[in-house]
Image: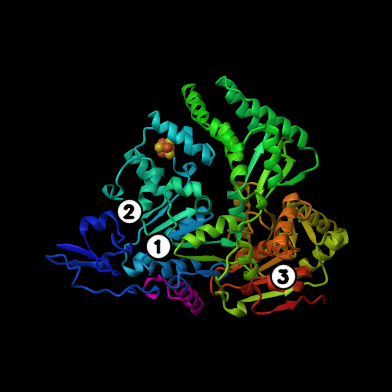
Amino acid sequence: MIWFICPNCGESHTLKEFRDSHFCKKCGKLMTYKNRVDSENSPRTEIKFSTSELRFTELFPYEPYPEQLEFMKDAESAILEKRVLVAEACNGFGKTACALASALSFGRKIIYATRTHEQVRQVLHEVQQINRKAGTMFSAVALASRQNLCLNDVCRRLPMFEAVEACRVLRETRRCPYKTKFNPSDLRLSLILSTEKMILHGRKKRLCPYFLSRAAAKDSTVVVAPYQYIFNEAIRVKVGLEISGKILIFDEAHNADKIGQEVLSDTLSERGLNNAKRELDLLDRSSYFIDRLLDYLESHVSEKPAVKSGSELFEDLEIFLDEDLSFLVDFYMPVVDEIREYKLSEGQVPVCYLNGLLNFLSLVGSSERDSYVAIYRRSKSGLKMIEYRCLDPSLAIKPVIKEAYSALIMSGTLSPMDYFTEILGLSEVKCRTYSAIARPENVHAYVDTSISTRFKERNEETLRIYGERIAKLVKKIPNGVLIFFPQRALMNQALEVWLRSGFVKKKGKDLFLGGKRVFEEGRSARENARIVKEYKQAAKTDNGAVLLAVFRGRNSEGSNFPYEEARGIFNVGLPYADYKDPFVKAQIEYLNRKKPRLGNLWYIMDAFRAANQALGRGIRHRDDWCRFYLMDRRYATHRRFISKWAVENGMEKISLS
Ligand code: SF4
């Protein structure tokens, strides 16, 4: 008879029990096929297993570099001590495989937070590689929203929270033909479940891929989920994502603070209010409170944005509505379902605007209002709105970290890590920064301290000087060159000045800088993909190519330009956020109140994070090389904000001769 013995506590499991769940029924430790024993009787008392049966070295699917071994050892000891490791390692380091190998060796369930589809693919690929190399049977599944997994046209196009409710109504009224209840172990699913696989399976078997992913997640060793799922308690409850006792891995965590804040923020708009009013009118319900809210918007939103504290907004609303917010929410909540059902019966999409409005009021009523700001402004299309925005990322991040068994927080751009962890509200964490995976001599940074794009200095002459210097340097760099600008407007202005000054030359329809053909980042994803493809082809030729792009844009984060695709990267200036923006101001003031100067440091860190991200595009492999040109004196004055891997080989001044 086949038994599976828990390597931690020795509990025995039948084959069926093992197939139903690979986690020990007694202690929760993961079992693999290595724990199989053939014996007539239950062998639980006879066999002893070591808790460190699988080491990360056995799991890591590649020949590890010393830096990778260092990272895996640090991750292992952090998990062993149930602590948090904050790790900065450059693009192409192999962070995903390292983190997975370390965490999987503990036999615990892992929740892996990702931001992009590309990252999800990468995580699933690395789990597959680990299984291949180590002969393990780790399972992994990607959780995604209904927008990605739903097969019902009515529901799929709705925003996330609307889709949740619409799906419920569709199921309750039997308007969705896809099965939602099943036992994943009866379905012969593959170990690694991507969204594409689940959709295929769902179509073939008439099963809902969204519910399939949730069911599969219960027993999967690795659950890959968007950041929003992890930070939002309501979503976690809905999808049954338990953090307690799990190892959390946050990948590309440099924006974790912003995502956390977004998850805890909401907006009240004139359009949403009018739509909700129409819904109540349809059902002959009183919409008096919505009229009052419209009056409030009318009297408080003007051309110039205005700011109030979260508490002031709360008091205003209760006075204006002459009602307790929580009472109002409870009173109108049952109407939400009536509206959805009415719309469905009329053949309409069951989206409910009243629900969105009640969620906003509920957030204002229940949140830590001292950590919020209310911004009254007009949308781009001129509609009045109030943004209720969270100023404290620790409200989203701290609770999940506290609940988890251990956490690995990693990115290529977390410097300076002491400020980063302070802003996230994480204390007693282990911070480590790792050398670039490329050979040190392959990464060189140069800084131009005679120039800056500061607003005071931003004029035609400055742009002309930039053009002159960059054109000279570009000539000396082989193949591809990336040039990043703080804003598209500045990029266009620079190009105009460079054309007029003769640094950029026009031949036919094409532009050339330093002898290389110039490409400009596309505005839409599709246009950009086409342009980047052409750029990459041109970069690989002897003539090379130049790509002009913006920080925080499509080409500065999440995309790769290995080898000839980027032999030089120019950072023209620094992408500071708009100081006059009411949210930026409120954020700085809030953090300064928390700790003197913390807000000012956040402001600098935010700009450098984007600048470091841009530099990270150029190095993907150990034998890759790239030159970084930091064209602003502020890079020299704030050197500690530059990621270590970018400047560990020193930072030379650009010679002007
Ligand atoms: S059950 Fe699945 S397919 Fe049907 S509406 Fe809900 S998410 Fe979509």
Residue 156 shows up from this direction: no
Secondary structure under tag 3 reads: strand
Residue 276 shows up from this direction: yes
Residues at circles 3 and 2 in contact by the CB criterion of under 8 Å: no
What residue type is disc 1 on?
Val
Q: Is residue 450 left or right of residue 263?
A: right
Mark 3 and mark 2 lie on one chain; the one further toward the N terminus is 2
Asked if disc 2 is less than 8 Å from ligand 1, the answer is no
Kindly report the secondary structure that dominates the magenta region of the rendered protein: helix
Secondary structure under tag 1 reads: helix
Q: What residue appears at the point 64 percent right and 56 percent down from the top-left corner?
A: 392
Q: Measured from the top left, where is residue 192 in percent x and y?
A: 37, 56
What residue type is disc 3 on?
Tyr
Secondary structure under tag 2 reads: loop
Residue range corresponding to the magenta coloring: 57-77
Disc 2 packing (10 Å; few <14; some 14–19; many ≥20): few
Q: Measured from the top left, where is residue 172 in percent x and y?
A: 39, 31
Q: Which residue in the rendered view is the most extreme toward the left?
A: 40
Mark 1 and mark 2 lie on one chain; the one further toward the N terminus is 1
What residue type is disc 2 on?
Ser
Q: What is the C-alpha distance between the residues marked 3 and 1?
A: 37 Å
Q: In this view, does 265 lie to the left or right of 143?
A: right
| Residue with the mark numbered 1 | 127
547 is within the stretch colored magenta: no
User: Residue 629 bears which disc, if any?
Assistant: 3
| Residue with the mark numbered 2 | 190
Quadrant housing residue 574: bottom right
